[in-house]
Amino acid sequence: MFKKILIANRGEIALRIIRACKEMGIKTVAVHSTADANSLHVRFADESVCIGPPKSTDSYLHVPSIISAAEITDAEAIHPGYGFLAENASFAEICNSTGMRFIGPSPESIKQMGDKARARATAIKAGVPVLPGSDGVVTEENSAIEIAREIGFPVIVKAAAGGGGKGMRVVLEEAEFANAFVMAQTEALAAFGNADVYIEKYLLQPRHIEIQLMADEKGNVVYLGERECSIQRRHQKLIEEAPSVTVDAALRKEMGEMAVAIAKNVKYRNAGTIEFLMDVDRKYYFMEMNTRIQVEHPVTEMVTGIDLVKEQIRVAAGLPLSFTQDQICIRGHSMECRINAEDPVKFTPSPGTITAFNPPGGPGIRVETAAYTQYVIPQYYDSMIAKLVVYADNRDDAIMRMKRALNEFIIEGVKTTIPMHKKILDDPDFQSGNISTKFMERYNNPQK
């Protein structure tokens, strides 16, 4: 087992990894920008190294500084968390080449599954259903329009190297296609340095269902049930839950085995997530793979009782999985609300100083945060303040517990999305499980 791990991240996920390491008897190294000098992940790590000024490209994305920090502190492994360098194959290669273990999949797996067009081809090879779409990347507008006509509108143009909703354009009719195609290419190039896009059929009212995987270096791959992530805005998830109200035991097994087939096809190791879109008839289609731990991993931990971050570390150290597929049991219901420093109506960022901070408590409540009273939310990074996670015996009780927790959660000094979450939880369609990725279109337009 590792003696010391460097965490190449910040905020709540860095703190989450530090806690797992402490419980495993592993020393930790925090890296931080000058803007994060007073952050909790810096305070609670055994050692800390400043790696640059606030701008991400000069600190959390600056590979030489991170590698240097690992070398001078004698770290044996690097955990990237999520975001920043977590799905950067070059970073994983550099870590491994310098003798430090990258706690994640192999660089080859990241490359293959990080490119959405290649990931789609991998899913097809593994026999997993995919939406009708282009055969790989499409570069020419004339070819693209012909493919779109063949698929049938509506379609979606998607960045091959993308994520987080960037480089995506939904096209409802042919007259809109040419402009959307060019815009998607332009945005993809600006966001990812890669203008490649591909085309897929667009589902009008889909659910977003994802399967959590864990794999070791011995070739063992297991699935840990599904998460429902349909409540999202501009492709950014807002509320996640496990299990999904629309997935029964038979469908869970079928989707889980499909996800495992993809992972085995690329000799995957460590934590990963296969994301599916599901139509109103419960037919599901591969969308993409996230080759890292997910923001919403706590809901899976709550219903399975398995610490995914500890398992990541164990697997990276060369140990076999500590459980088998037969030992995975889904119990109860868990739900997560992402609490962001944003205007809950305009969704504009609200950085500043938190003047009062009182997280909720009581049975079944888990708060993942690095915030505190007088904490200054930097303008340079993601606006998430906390992940509020609840667990209960069933979904109805989980909703009631989440409502209670949101009412207890006091954050003053900045605007937050807590009012938005309260409104969603009071919605009859949400309460009945009648949701899709289009749910939030009604938030500011109740007539829809």
Image (cartoon, grey):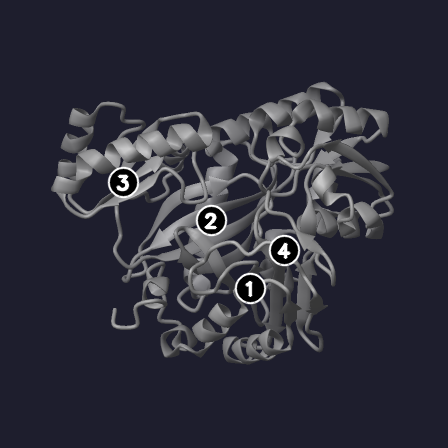
Q: Residue at x 36, y 67 (%)?
A: 443
Task: Decide if residue 25 is on the left or right side of residue 15.
Answer: right
The residue at the far top in this view is 97
Q: Nearer the viewer, mark 3 or mark 2?
A: 3
Residue 170, can we see it? yes
Q: Nearer the viewer, mark 4 or mark 1?
A: 4
Question: Judging from the image, what secondary structure is the residue with disc 2 in?
Answer: helix
Measured as percent of width and height from the top left, residue 339 is found at 57, 62
User: Which mark is first along the chain, 1 or 2?
Assistant: 2
- Residue designated by label 4: 352
- Residue designated by label 1: 416
Residue in the foreground of this view, choosing between 228 and 444: 444
Residue 200: image tag: 3
Location of residue 83 by image quarter: top right
User: Which mark is first along the chain, 1 or 3?
Assistant: 3
Residue type (three-letter) at the residue carrying disc 3: Glu
Residue 257: image tag: 2
Task: Decide if residue 314 is on the left or right side of residue 25.
Answer: left
User: Which mark is first along the chain, 4 or 2?
Assistant: 2
Asked whether the residues under the numbered discs 2 and 4 touch, taking CB atoms below 8 Å apart as contact, a structural biologist would say no
Q: Residue at x 15, y 25 (%)?
A: 142
Q: Nearer the viewer, mark 3 or mark 1?
A: 1
Measured as percent of width and height from the top left, residue 447 is found at 25, 72
Residue type (three-letter) at the residue carrying disc 2: Glu
Question: Judging from the image, what secondary structure is the residue with disc 3 in?
Answer: strand
Q: CA distance from mark 3 to mark 2?
A: 24 Å
